[in-house]
Image: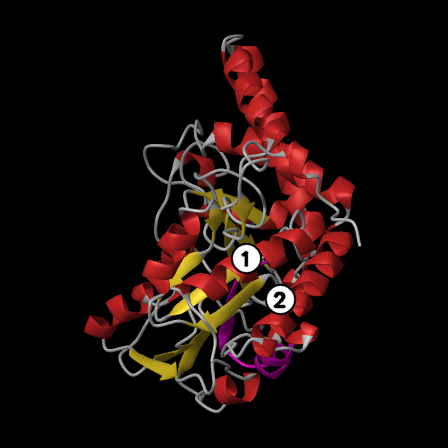
């Protein structure tokens, strides 16, 4: 099967084996060109601002196709951590409330809730079992005082994919909100944003973008009454209203969570990268990634490695992790051979995007067996 994404479309892939997309992806040539065009547009003054607005609208529209939510339901912030904390600040917490999270989540989805402990909020942590957490394990910790449940769609740690629709189906007729972090898959896979109350994500991983944008998508079905506790001129309906020194009114859509200008150079780059992904076909990317993941998992198991990621394609995306106590050391040894993988947390993670082919898998396995032999 040919890879849906052409390595020649990226800067530097001719000389490296990039299994590092769970950390960040290689730069796209079209994104680099787009950033250059951003600077050229900025030199046109007011014309540049008009082009910025057009690129932002196009980028949000591209995201809406990947999230099954209208573009007006998408806000652009600085990063995922800011998006999660904006939500945390927006809720009226009371002593005795609780939040449910799990041990497969990245710190961005953990730290804002720990901060609430000093306000009397309980943080209920679901421990993974064999590197997996089920929807029922999350729901078993929910009660009438649970204000919010949060999970990653795909774990940065194990690569396990959470069936989020099962959690939302159980919560949507309750007062408990549901946040999903799609950082570790969106772009290479589509997520149905109607199966969560809030969706957050990063710009520089599977979306093939650059650092500088955090995505906050809001499902309006249960969130209309949630008002941010931070405010900036981008979040209000009329910043030059005659009464602007007395009061303000938030936008009714997701823009209410925006404060000031976003990183427009990032938006130009990501408008190009999301066009690129949509033109290639996100579903084509997903299928290829799952096929390459199966090849890698089969090879790892055949060589005696302990694989943390579920074998069933329905329960994983692009991250394939194996137990490796010397993860940092092994990843450094691989990098010396121009093979980029991520090591840490007592594991090694190979992240397969849609430009990875079988030769990359074979090269990785040959080097891995030299630096960290299986059992």
Between 272 and 18, the residue placed more toward the observer is 18
Q: How is the image coloured?
A: secondary structure
Residue located 46% across and 39% down the image: 236
SS of the residue under disc 1: helix
Q: Is any part of residue 133 visible from this angle?
A: yes
Q: Mark 2 near mark 1, Cβ–Cβ under 8 Å?
A: yes
- In terms of sequence position, does the residue under pointer 2 or pointer 1 come before the other? 2
**Res 157 → quadrant:** bottom left
Residue at 45%, 32% in the rendered image: 263
Magenta stretch?
165-186
Horizontal and vertical percent position of residue 356: 64, 50
Q: Which residue is mark 2?
A: 296
Residue position for label 1: 364
Q: Residue furthest top?
A: 44
Q: Is residue 174 magenta?
A: yes
Residue 159 in the image, given as x and y percentages of width and height: 53, 69
How far apart, in angstroms, are the residues tagged by discs 2 and 1? Answer: 9 Å
């Amino acid at each position: 099967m040919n890879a849906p994404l052409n390595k020649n479309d990226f800067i530097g892939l001719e000389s490296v084996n990039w299994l590092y997309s769970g950390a960040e992806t290689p730069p796209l040539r079209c994104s680099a060109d787009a950033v250059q065009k951003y600077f050229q547009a900025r030199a046109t003054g007011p014309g540049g601002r008009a082009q910025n607005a057009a690129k932002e609208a196009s980028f949000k529209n591209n995201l809406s196709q990947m999230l099954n939510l209208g573009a007006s339901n998408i806000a652009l912030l600085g990063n995922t951590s800011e998006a999660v904390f904006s939500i945390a600040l927006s809720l009226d917490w009371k002593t005795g409330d609780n939040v449910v999270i799990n041990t497969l989540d990245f710190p961005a989805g953990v730290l804002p809730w720990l901060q609430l402990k000093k306000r009397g909020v309980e943080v209920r942590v679901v421990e993974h079992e064999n590197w997996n957490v089920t929807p029922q394990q999350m729901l078993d910790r929910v009660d009438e005082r649970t204000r919010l449940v949060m999970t990653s769609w795909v774990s940065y740690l194990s690569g396990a994919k959470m069936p989020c629709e099962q959690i939302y189906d159980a919560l949507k007729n309750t007062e408990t909100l549901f946040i999903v972090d799609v950082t570790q898959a969106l772009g290479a896979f589509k997520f149905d944003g109607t199966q969560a109350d809030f969706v957050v994500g990063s710009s520089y991983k599977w979306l093939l973008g650059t650092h500088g944008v955090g995505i906050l998508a809001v499902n309006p079905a249960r969130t209309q009454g949630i008002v941010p506790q931070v405010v900036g001129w981008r979040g209000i309906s009329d910043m030059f209203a005659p009464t602007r020194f007395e009061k303000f009114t938030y936008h009714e859509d997701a823009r209410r969570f925006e404060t000031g200008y976003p990183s427009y150079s990032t938006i130009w780059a990501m408008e190009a990268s999301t066009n690129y992904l949509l033109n290639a076909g996100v579903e084509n990317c997903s299928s290829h990634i799952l096929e390459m993941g199966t090849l890698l998992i089969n090879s790892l198991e055949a060589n005696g490695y302990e694989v943390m990621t579920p074998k069933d394609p329905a329960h994983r995306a692009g991250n394939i992790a194996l137990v490796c106590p010397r993860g940092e050391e092994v990843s450094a040894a691989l990098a010396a051979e121009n093979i980029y993988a991520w090591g840490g947390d007592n594991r090694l993670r190979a992240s397969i995007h849609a430009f990875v082919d079988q030769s990359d898998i074979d090269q990785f396995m040959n080097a891995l067996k030299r630096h960290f032999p299986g059992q």
